[in-house]
Amino acid sequence: MTQVRPAFKDERKLTYLNRDGADKPLISPVPQATLDAARAYRLARLRQQMAQHDVAGLLLYDPINIRYAVDSSNMQIWTGHNPVRYAMILAGGPAILWEFKGCEHLNNGLPGIDEIRTAVSWMFMTKGDKAPVGVEGWADEIADVIRQHGGGNRRFAADRLDGPGLHALQKRGLTFVEGGELTERARSIKSPDEIELMRWTIRVCEAGMARIYEHSVPGVTERELWAHLHFENARSGGDWLETKLLTCGPNTNPWYKECSDRVCRLGEMISFDTDMIGPYGYCADLSRSWTCGYTPMTDTQRRIYATALDQIYHNLDVLKPGMTFAEFNERSWRIPERHVDYRYSLAVHGVGMADEWPVIPLHVDFDETAMSGVIEPGMVVCVESLVGEEGSESVKLETQVLVTETGIERLDSFPWESI
């Protein structure tokens, strides 16, 4: 039986921790002017989409869209599933935020907000049998705002709206326009200032990845490793992790198992996908794989890792501004047959304040239902790979890139493994 021997740590990875040797939060060097310019750009992008869709108002309940519009954040996870705060952008008027009662002061100094009101909640959890009464008062206020500032236009868009609210607004003569396309297209093109904010989120994420690497030793559990990314993100001003995708050994295949209390063993593959919503609300969506205990890879591990890296490099080379999604698919990397049943469902997806439009499926899954579109300068996309086979571990790799006028630029730089 071949003995698996420990190896030395890759010092390149550890340099992503605090470079002065002190274990402390990372403090952003981004100037206030950069943040304010990004805020103004984002609000303008939404107004442009509103004009194109001919809507008088854009009603936002998704906390990510609210943050994109006016940079207001409050209880993001809780309000993601409890509709208790919302905002409206008026095409010919102000940006109004309806804040959770008692939290109005959290928005002091935000330049994109023209008016703050106290939110009206009408979900059953907060109103019970009085919810039908609550929704009527809420709808009266929303309809009145559109009437004041809409210039006679009765069309409004909303990113998400429960049935009672939609019906109440329609009863008041308003016409609903689906807001998902509007907000996704607005968010898809980033300004240079946004990219600077995203670079800092990636810097924090890579410090968290280095912390995971530093603790990737036999006896650690998957959850313990995952906690290091949470820790680095939280103490450096980030928000949350969208998933719990860190596994080791046999838990890596099939993919999508969440981290558990399983103990990682010497030589096993550790694979993870960060899905980290970090400082300034931007997402760092990066994936890496390496062996527990810094051992040399086995022949199978090395072959699978090399295959995954080949997919990443091939698709990075293919990706170009002006290319349609279908053109990218035609030229994209082809997965070997032995890995097809263990594949990832997509090759490329957009990313900004979370995973975003567009999503380009892996060629195996690219059919008549695949979305159409063009890869445009200013988009940020993640290029993905997941490679496994029957009886093997899985290797998960992912990099985040900016589409420029002439090509692409990788935004992350955390090293791949040496194979």
Image: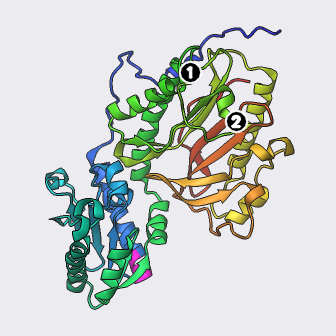
Q: CA distance from mark 1 to mark 2?
A: 28 Å
Taking the spot 51% from the left edge, 29% from the top edge, the residue there is 209
Does 53 appear in magenta?
yes
The type of residue carrying mark 2 is: Asn
Quarter that holds the C terminus: top right
Q: In this figure, which residue is indicated by the disc labeled 2?
A: 253
**At 60% across and 31% down in the image, what residue appears?**
247
Left or right, residue 3 beside residue 244:
right
- Taking the view exactly as shown, the residue that stands out farthest to the front is 129
The answer to whether residue 56 is seen in the rendering is: no
Front residue of 24 and 270: 270
Instruction: Give the labeled residue for mark 1.
Output: 12
Does residue 419 sit above or below 244 in this rendering? above
Quick one: which residue is furthest to the right in this view? 337
The prevailing secondary structure element of the residues shown in magenta is helix
x and y, in percent, of residue 164 in the image: 34, 75
Kind of element beneath mark 2: loop
Tell us which disc is closer to us: 1 or 2: 2
Q: Residue 391, position in %: x, y? A: 79, 31
Q: Earlier in the sequence, mark 1 or mark 2?
A: 1
Q: Are marks 1 and 2 in contact (CB under 8 Å)?
A: no
Sort mark 1 into few (<14), some (14-19) or many (20+) by Cα contacts within 10 Å: few
Q: Is residue 329 visible?
A: yes
Decide: is 144 above or below 396: below
Q: Residues within 10 Å of mark 2 (few under 14, many from 20)?
A: many
Residue 229: image x %, image y %?
A: 45, 31
Q: Tag 1's secondary structure?
A: helix
Magenta segment boundaries in residue numbering: 50-54
